Image (cartoon, rainbow, N blue to C red):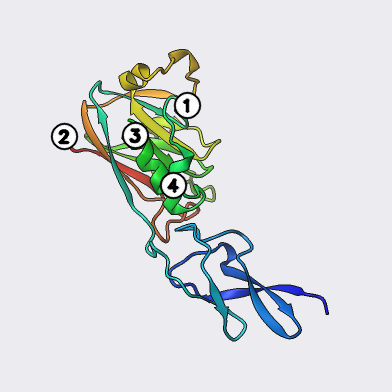
Amino acid sequence: MAIRSKRLPVSEANGHQFVNNEAEVNVFNGETFPAGFPFGGCRICGQHPTYEVVEEAAHVQEPCSHPDGITTTITLSVPSGKLLVSDNLRPVYNWGDDALVDYNCVLGRDRAIKAMAAIGCAFGHASDRSLGLYRTEQDRYIIATPWIDFDNDETPSIPDETCLAQICTDIWSYSLADYEHWLSMGGDPETLDSGDTVVNVTPGTYQFVHHSGERGFDVDSEGTVIFAHVDRIA
């Protein structure tokens, strides 16, 4: 008798999140055997937990280490008052892959953000939609995607005049650094392209609160999608 594979819904995820909320099983001789998750591990912690099949559904056994997702907070020193805004400041700033779990999960991206912050770069994960750095108040900013209602007046949810830098989304990320620090690390102004911007800000220390790892964060939601809040704290 041949082995037959099929997918079952995950009815008890134990805090994990899976693509399509499905698990795979093999059926042989009337018995069902767990066979893993067809689209990879947990989208939050990256793990591949075990599960039991109960009434044609998967019940995950081990709990997720971060069931509420992760809000990642880092600081960036900008003593020059010149903030370089880009989609990609690698290879000047980069993290070691050996220190990370899977970047495709929230925990992996959290570690990448912290590793980049440790060497002077505020890095974050984004989507492929329009992205920019917007001033909300004096010394307060957001990295966000505005909502545009194309069925009505097409006015963006964030005023265009508050946008200090548009960020290319070809690689689904953003990177910010003190311009003078970037130069001291070997950055070459000739390598900057039209999508990179140097923004004048108040010199000081800025706190970045990254939201894309939070449970329920939806890049496709209607309204302004805020990837990070940026505030001068010193």
- Kind of residue indicated by mark 2: Ala
Picture quadrant of residue 39: bottom right
- The local secondary structure at tag 3 comes to helix
In terms of depth relative to the viewer, which is nearer, 194 or 56? 56
In terms of depth relative to the viewer, which is nearer, 158 or 215? 215
| Residue at the spot of label 3 | 162
- Kind of residue indicated by mark 1: Pro
Left or right placement of residue 46 versus residue 83 in this view: right
Q: Are marks 2 and 1 in contact (CB under 8 Å)?
A: no
* Quadrant location of the C terminus in the rendered image: top left
Dot 2 alpha-carbon crowd within 10 angstroms: few under 14, some 14 to 19, many 20 or more: few
- The local secondary structure at tag 4 comes to helix
**First of labels 2, 1 by sequence position:** 1
Using the image, tell me which numbered label, if any, was put on residue 218. Answer: none
In three-dimensional space, the C-alpha distance between marks 2 and 3, rounded to whole angstroms, equals: 23 Å
- Foreground: disc 1 or disc 3: 1
Q: Is residue 128 visible?
A: yes
**First of labels 2, 3 by sequence position:** 3
- Foreground: disc 2 or disc 1: 1
In three-dimensional space, the C-alpha distance between marks 4 and 1, rounded to whole angstroms, equals: 17 Å
Left or right placement of residue 87 versus residue 58 in this view: left
Which residue is drawn at the image coordinates 52% and 42% (left, top)? Answer: 129
| Residue at the spot of label 2 | 234
Dot 1 alpha-carbon crowd within 10 angstroms: few under 14, some 14 to 19, many 20 or more: few
Which residue is drawn at the image coordinates 34% and 34% (left, top)? Answer: 162
**First of labels 4, 1 by sequence position:** 1
| Residue at the spot of label 1 | 91
| Residue at the spot of label 4 | 109
- Kind of residue indicated by mark 3: Thr
Dot 4 alpha-carbon crowd within 10 angstroms: few under 14, some 14 to 19, many 20 or more: many
In three-dimensional space, the C-alpha distance between marks 1 and 3, rounded to whole angstroms, equals: 30 Å
